[in-house]
Image (cartoon, grey):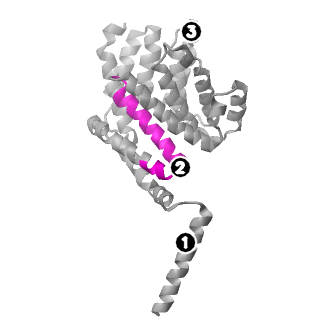
Amino acid sequence: MPLCIHRRHAAFAGLAMVWLALSGCSTSQLVARAAAPLIDHGVAAMNRETDLELARASIPANLKMIEALLLADPGNASYRVQAAMGFYGYALGFVESTDRDRAAALYWRARDHALAALDRAGMVQATLMGDAAELERALAELDASAVPALFWTASAWGKWIELQLDDPARLAELPRVEALMRRVLALDETYYYGGVHVFFGVYYGGRAPMFGGDFARAARHFDRAAALSQNRLKLVDVYRARYLLWQMGEREAFHATLSRVLDAPAGSDPELNLVNALARQQAADLLAHEEDLF
């Protein structure tokens, strides 16, 4: 009996070694991939957080854990997207208001992670930064599986540009960001609660018409984002007020929209607890500066 057990163990070990060799996965890669459910639960737990100070203190450690896993499994597109989301959210929620230079660096880091995922989806960075017609052809070949990488690449890239609007070279990159988001719009407008419509609401609402703005178009995008999220994502109203209503000089609507965000019950939508808590904080900050803005 012991000999039989030993033989079985040896056979199992041999099969395992063959499987590892055939799969091309190292032990560290297997361990990293096995952590995926834990990372998913960690992201879900963070999204449910209502205490902004606790979130501020916790997010960096979570981001470094994901980057540690990426050292073992650098081609893991799912971890790349989660890292991009995390760095983007951390910069947006906790850094940009006090340190724009650091926020820009974090947005660039988020963009790098998302670009790595986009590369896995079939678009290399050379194409992204190359000929515009070639970029459009490459985008047309991407399917819905590329939406997360497209969305977070464009989101992080767009915010990085927004913090450097005085640099003409950065503004020249904006049409490429728009092209990525247009592909998201074509493939899946529902991704991240209609976030692509928030992007275009800001894109058309945050500029005067003489500089390419289109207030009617922006309003339609914000309305669509609100419909797709069933008014659950409070950042839709915050961005409508911050970028569109302020640009239009609509102070009464600005005040009413942000007040509606503040009046919404906290914790009523657990999976959006954190982002909605940040939305309430931003709404309060904007209302505190209403006199200066108008």
Q: Which residues are magenta?
A: 68-97
Amino acid type of the residue tagged 3 in the rendering: Phe
Amino acid type of the residue tagged 1 in the rendering: Ala
Give percent across and percent down for residue 143.
66, 41
What residue is rendered at 64% in x and 37% in y?
A: 124
Q: Is residue 98 above or below residue 27?
A: above
Give percent across and percent down for residue 41.
40, 51
Relative depth, front residue between 263 and 118:
118
Front tag of 2 and 3: 2
Q: Earlier in the sequence, mark 2 or mark 3?
A: 2
Relative depth, front residue between 85 and 206:
85
Magenta-colored stretch includes residue 80: yes
Tell me: 141 left or right of 90.
right
Q: Earlier in the sequence, mark 1 or mark 2?
A: 1
Q: Is residue 273 above or below residue 292?
A: below
Magenta-colored stretch includes residue 57: no
For disc 1, the neighbor class at 10 Å (few under 14, some 14 to 19, many from 20) is: few
Q: Find disc 3 in the rendering and name its residue.
A: 211
For disc 2, the neighbor class at 10 Å (few under 14, some 14 to 19, many from 20) is: some
Amino acid type of the residue tagged 2 in the rendering: Asn
Q: Find disc 1 in the rendering and name its residue.
A: 16
